[in-house]
Image (cartoon, coloured by chain):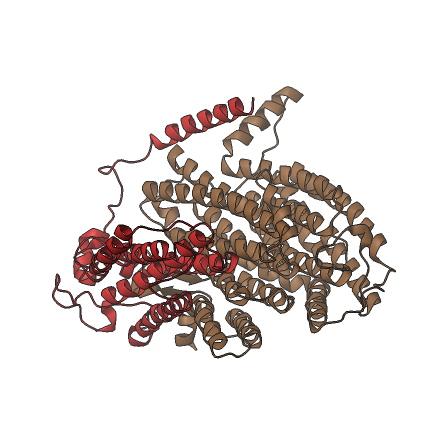
Chain colours: A brown, B red
Amino acid sequence: MTVFAGHLPVFLIALPLLAVPLLYLIDRLGANSRNVALLFYALMALAAGVPWLPGFPAEVVAEIGGWPADIGIELRLDALARLFLPVVGVIGLLGTVAADPGEATGPFYPLSFLLLAGSNGLILTNDLFNAYVFLEITSISSYALVGFRRDTRGFESGFKYIVVGSLASVLLLWGIAGLYAVSGTLAFSRFAAALPAVPGRAAVAAAVLVVVGLLTKLGIAPFHAWKADALAGAPRSVAATLAGATVSAYFVVLVRVLTTVPGGIGFGLRPATGGFFMRLSAYVSEFVAAGIPGMLILLSGASIIVGHLTALRQTRLSRLLAYSSVAHFGYIIAGVAVGTVPALAGAFLHAVHHAFMKAGLFLFIPLAADSAERDRITSLTCGRTAPALVGSAMIFLTMGMVGIPPAAGFASKWILVLETARAGAPFAAILIALGGAIALVYYLRLSLAAVGRTRSSSPRRSPADVRVFAAFLVCAGYVFVAFWATDLLAGIAISVAETTLGGGG
Amino acid sequence: MKRTTAALIVTVLVVLAGFAASELPSEAERAEPVNHAIRSLADTGAVNAVSAVLFDYRAFDTLGEATVIITTAMIVAFLAPQARASMLSVRMSGIVLYGVVLLLPFIAVFGLAIMLYGHISPGGGFTGGVVLSTSAVLYAVVYSAGGQQSYVLAPATNKMIENVAMTAFLAVGFFGMAASGAFLANAATGIGLGTPGSLLSAGTIPLLNVISGLKVGVGLAIIIISLFLE
């Protein structure tokens, strides 16, 4: 077990890479590689769950080439990685299984494996530059998957995504070089020791560049403009994977940067006394002095407001869901910026729940729309297969999005509201609560439009429909089960947050 | 108006960046000297410290970067099918046609030398691969003129080489894992580092040089030829 455990981080990255030549070989032999690809992906998703087995060590460090982190590259399977590996694996699997066989041709499955290898690498690596390499693999394969339909809309989305994504990559690279110049190390686990507790302006500038690059990849306002185009132009199954799995991997890197670079998290305003203007000026000066966490709180507030208000005006479901993602990552970033153990736990929990809810709602589109291109909210139905079940599952998922019990989003959002308020960011708490109210309006509109209408036209029924149906139900099922397992999941999230903050990596 | 705003924003950002960068430590003040160059000869047997970093200490990054190129090649070949060669309706003159044939062996030998001697002298797999790919691109561009497409290697062969090289890189990694317990291990596997400076030295580094050179060369050839002939 221990020998195997020590190699697991490498296997989680190297085996998806090996899948690329394997699928090529199968194609060359003239066999159909789809079933092999799905089976292999399922095995990788299972392998991502292995660290949860009893007896698996709490932290596994794999030194690549036998070199320690100061001179080489290390992979670390720690608590944070253990939490997010299965999210990436399972949602990636659901998205890959639900792919339309008509669309999933050519290099679709190899690119899916490259996306998985990149995401796993992002989650596992303990080295900032190595994270950049995996970020490139992840981004480039997702650019291609977004434009995979090869129609005008797909190309436009893919192109916008490439332009903004490359800009983010450049900022990141610049910031990484700066952090390396200041600290002399690239390992996350060594930043805390290598940088002074109050970093100088060069270190802060470098860290801000890295953080802004990652926030762009996550789609936080005002760096979110690409997101709706990318997710609306992509094939639905790809959109589910990107909005659920890939984003989680970017989020893990952001958390690693913020928790290891001194001054990355920890926002809280102390109550001030005196007259209104005295208090106001005290708050403003404290806010400015907060540095990176202050910036994160501002951006998260902007994301919540912009995301929800823009989502409210959308007429197409995929764009609505993309803007809702902007707002939800606003909630999550607020929790991270506050940076206390419970707030961070709330952020982790919400990131996991949001991944499943958003993937589920993206998989609802192919069930509800007449054709792949049309997802106008007023023309949506509840599909042909078991419309009552699909309709109620969809309503359940939107309840999770808004944060109404008994759906999983409720508890995580509740923790975020309480903990941001308690730590001294009451405006963030107010915005999170208010955001739910706006979301209620647009999700009610969706429910009213879709429920009660079944799809009568186009009696086409393909095996893909059944796969999408199953993947959609898995997401809805997760949101149902996760609500009743809230105590267990919150406990796990709190222990992950404690390890992440306590060890410093 | 837009231009003025953009210029203003850029100026402010440049000033801020300069302000931040003025605090970057100089080479002398750096707290922890970059120690790869000091220990690389003893650790890896490679005279070229850059190769030691790229193919031993941080070989995992190189695996990733080569994968990026393969991914891009895969995407470009998929998005830009090599069906039309409309851009190249010009006929090349005899001087160009024969000149290229005379040049090609020299370019190829130069590329191979950079690749094979990467652990001894400046160069390595990436650089050698790029030089090799220029010979393929040159041939395809010159001899595809006039509509008839011809390649040094057929696109299908390129694709096969690429996949074989990827498998080989991972195989070297797993060999390290089997022999010493660490993925991509070199000296620790006990294969012997040889005499520094000789062609067969530095353990797996020359092998990885050749593999990544093939990956990069073939990948770039696919990318450029697909884009050019579209």
Horizontal side, residue B96 vs residue A93: left or right: left
| Residue at 45 percent of width and 39 percent of height | A209
Which quadrant of the rendered structure holds the N terminus of chain A? bottom left
Horizontal side, residue A184 vs residue A228: left or right: left
Q: How many marks?
A: 0
State whether residue A137 is above or below residue A56: above
Which quadrant of the rendered structure holds the C terminus of chain A? bottom left
Horizontal side, residue A395 vs residue A231: left or right: right
Front residue of A170/A200: it is A170
Residue A159 horizontal/vertical position (percent)? 55, 47
Residue B67 horizontal/vertical position (percent)? 41, 60
Front residue of A299/B97: it is B97
State whether residue A96 is above or below residue A344: below
State whether residue A450 is above or below residue A279: below
Q: Quadrant of residue A108?
A: bottom right
Q: Is residue A497 visible?
A: no
Residue A490 horizontal/vertical position (percent)? 63, 59
Front residue of A171/A484: it is A171
Q: Residue furthest right?
A: A452
Q: Is residue A59 visible?
A: yes
Residue B116 horizontal/vertical position (percent)? 21, 62
